[in-house]
Image (tube, rainbow, N blue to C red):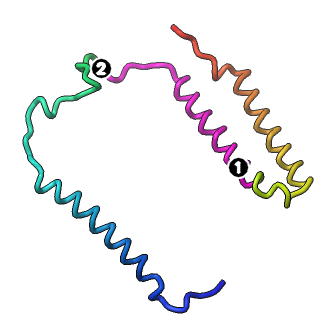
Amino acid sequence: MNAPDNIIDYLPIVITCFVAGGFVSLVIFGTHFLGPKRKSKVKLDVFECGIQPQGNARIPFSIKYFLAAILFVLFDVEIIFMYPWAVDFKVLHWTGFVEMLSYMAVLLVGFFYVLKKGALKFDMD
């Protein structure tokens, strides 16, 4: 690797970071100090899509919604690992192809396990 000839080459990046940080700080503090400070019961009341709040917000519901979200993230992240393989597909030759087949096999075993356990079945009550 080549070392930078001069630290002055990074000066525009440093100036840009300071200007951006200064602007963000100015806007945040400026709106806080200059904005109106009118507090009322209506303003501080809970607002949920125009519907008046009623009852307890801690109503239990099915864990299957969380499970579906976690499974989506899990398999989505696993798919992301295929992109570097696809980019270097020609370089990896048969070794890379066999490795990806084994990777896909593990993913499919996990997916069929999830299906067999019924994690993606929802009872519509």
State the image coordinates of residue 4 (x, y, percent, origin top left).
55, 87
Q: Is residue 89 magenta?
A: no
Q: Is residue 17 above or below residue 40?
A: below
The answer to whether the residues at label 2 and label 1 have Cβ atoms under 8 Å apart is no
- At 17% from the left and 54% from the top, the residue drawn is 31
- Answer few, some or many: residues within 10 Å of disc 2's Cα (few below 14, many 20 plus, some between 14 and 19): few
Tell me which amino acid carries mark 1.
Phe
Disc on the earlier residue, 2 or 1 = 2
Q: Is residue 114 left or right of residue 89?
A: left
Q: Which mark is residue 56?
A: 2
Can you say which quadrant of the picture contains the N terminus?
bottom right
Q: Determine whether the residue tagged by mark 2 lies in a helix, strand or loop.
A: loop
- Which quadrant of the structure image shows residue 109? top right
Instruction: Tell me if mark 1 has few (under 14), some (14-19) or many (20+) residues whose alpha carbon lies within 10 angstroms of its own.
Output: few
Query: Is the magenta region chiefly helix, strand or loop?
Result: helix
Percent x, y for residue 17? 37, 71
> Which residue ends up furthest to the top in the rendered image?
125
Q: Position of residue 11 (x, y in %)?
A: 41, 82
The residue depicted at 27 percent of the width and 68 percent of the height is 22
Is 29 situated above or below 51? below
19 vs 40, nearest the viewer: 19
Q: Which residues are magenta?
A: 57-84
On screen, residue 103 above or below 54:
below
Residue at the spot 47% in from the left edge and 88% down from the top edge: 7
Of circles 2 and 1, the one toward us is 1
Classify residue 26 by image quadrant. Answer: bottom left
Q: Is residue 77 magenta?
A: yes
Residue 81 — which label? 1
For the residues labelled 2 and 1, the Cα–Cα distance comes to: 42 Å
